[in-house]
Amino acid sequence: MSTESKEPETFRDKVSTIDKQGHRVWVYPKKPKGPIHRARVVTAVILLAFLFLAPFIKMNDRPLLLFDILNRKFIIFGLVFWPQDFYLFVLATLTLVVFIVLFTVVFGRVWCGWACPQIVFMELVFRKIEYWIEGDARKQRTLAAADWTAEKIFKKSLKHSIFYAISFVIGNTFLAYIIGVDALFKIITDPPSEHIAGLTTMILFSTIFYWVFAYFREQACTMVCPYGRLQGVLLDPNSIVVAYDFKRGEPRGKLSRSNHDSQKGDCIDCNLCVDVCPTGIDIRNGTQLECVNCAACIDACNEVMVKVNRPKGLIRYDSYNGIVRGLKLKLTPRIAGYSAILLLLVSLLTVLMLSRSPVETTILRTPGVLYQETEDGYLTNLYNIKIINKTFETMPIRIELENPVGRIRLIGGEMQVEEDNLAETAFFIELPKQQVKLVRTPVTVAIYSGRKLIERVRTSFIGPGFRRSGS
Ligand code: SF4
Ligand code: SF4
């Protein structure tokens, strides 16, 4: 979607942050201000407070959020998920993807501008510090071009020290989401020699974040982020994006006394919308892959429009069809289709979550061990049992053979599974020899916690067999 200019769209042939020689063009966006920017700052404060506090918040003595990849255990809002819940994880991811697709089809890249951690940190944390130390865009440019005077060394060192300190906090928070705050504090407080791997990871995370926010910056959004690359297929003429009203704005031209009498549009070609853009693009060229919907150009243009006494909204949140035909947001077949799929996925996920067993038992015959015969006329099979307790209570476990008639001999005595943990042991199933008529006899094992039946597990019993089973 571009303006309806007849000129060739040469801006699409190049990336605004790369020059003809292939060198990086450093973007010095003008300091944004205005009501949308202020709303974004408030949103950012709320999101950052949640991001930094979440690892410390506990529910039932467990972290609110934990993504313990090493132990393959996730805790989300107090609920524990183990590898056995992988199907739920896949379904939840699929639901999230469909939600993002639907949201993007309707509202474009609102996520990027308002909630993506990359933009929130870059534009509303690191960039603010840069403005504070080095001044607005023009001053930053001058400082970058200046010789290494004492002032420049001081400003650059101060900025990069603060950048690294914040990156260190981000890196540690990121680590806290993976290993938990308690483990993180141990790494910080114990002697360094005891946590070489943890400290290395800490430094690595911090350095990566520092590099991204100090140097890589908008390139993460325009060149790396897969969500950004998907915009071309997700957006359609009905999607609400940050858009320039070319019908009203063109033909653009500098403000003059006779402006009102001429055929000129409302755009006075002041270039402010370009100056504030953190990705260095000109939104007047139409929707572009690089636009992260930060809305800085809306605020800048609205201020200009007020000054030249013209209505606000020359750049605004609108769709291509809204600008060309004045159409409002409507339910299209595409939106209806995605909504139906999303509803289906959410329903399925809800049902599966509600019916999720709090205890997961896996019983497997010990590999490489055949049946054995006891002196009192029984055949025995050895099994390994793994029980995952997803609750926050310790469970004493009792195993009973439900079918056929026989007995169970647990190795190592009573079994107990700690809260939010797993336990493994082995046991024998012993069946009277005359009862084992098949090579593979189906058996049912009941798992009890106290008097409560928590699960029934079916497995098979290997015997000599007088005839083969069909199973
Ligand atoms: S800020 Fe508004 S008036 Fe100025 S160049 Fe951009 S669109 Fe035109
Ligand atoms: S074009 Fe406007 S909304 Fe898009 S990135 Fe630039 S300033 Fe932000």
Image: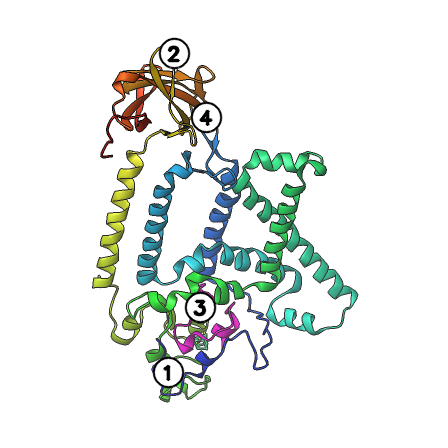
Q: Earlier in the sequence, mark 2 or mark 4?
A: 2
Viewer-side label of 1, 3: 3
> Does the magenta run of residues contain 257?
no
Q: Are marks 3 and 4 in contact (CB under 8 Å)?
A: no
Q: Earlier in the sequence, mark 4 or mark 1?
A: 1
What residue does disc 2 label? 375
Estimate the x, y position of residue 401 in percent, counting from the top left.
31, 18
What residue does disc 3 label? 291
Q: Is mark 3 within 8 Å of ligand 2?
A: yes
Viewer-side label of 2, 4: 2
What residue does disc 4 label? 423
User: Foreground residue, 368 or 443?
Assistant: 368
Circle 2 Cα neighbour tier, 10 Å, few/some/many (<14 / 14–19 / ≥20): few
Q: Residue at x 44, y 60 (%)?
A: 113
Which element type, helix, strand or loop, lies under badge 1? loop
Q: Quadrant of the N terminus?
A: bottom left
Circle 1 Cα neighbour tier, 10 Å, few/some/many (<14 / 14–19 / ≥20): many
In this image, 78 relative to 463: left or right? right
Q: Earlier in the sequence, mark 2 or mark 3?
A: 3
User: Foreground residue, 470 or 138?
Assistant: 470
Q: Is residue 357 above or below residue 436?
A: below
Q: Earlier in the sequence, mark 2 or mark 1?
A: 1
What residue does disc 1 label? 250
Viewer-side label of 4, 1: 4
Q: Is residue 164 above or below residue 276?
A: above
Q: Which residues make up the magenta segment?
A: 271-296
* Identity of the residue furthest to the top in this view: 376
Residue 272 in view here: yes
Q: How many angstroms separate mark 2 from mark 1 (CA)?
A: 98 Å
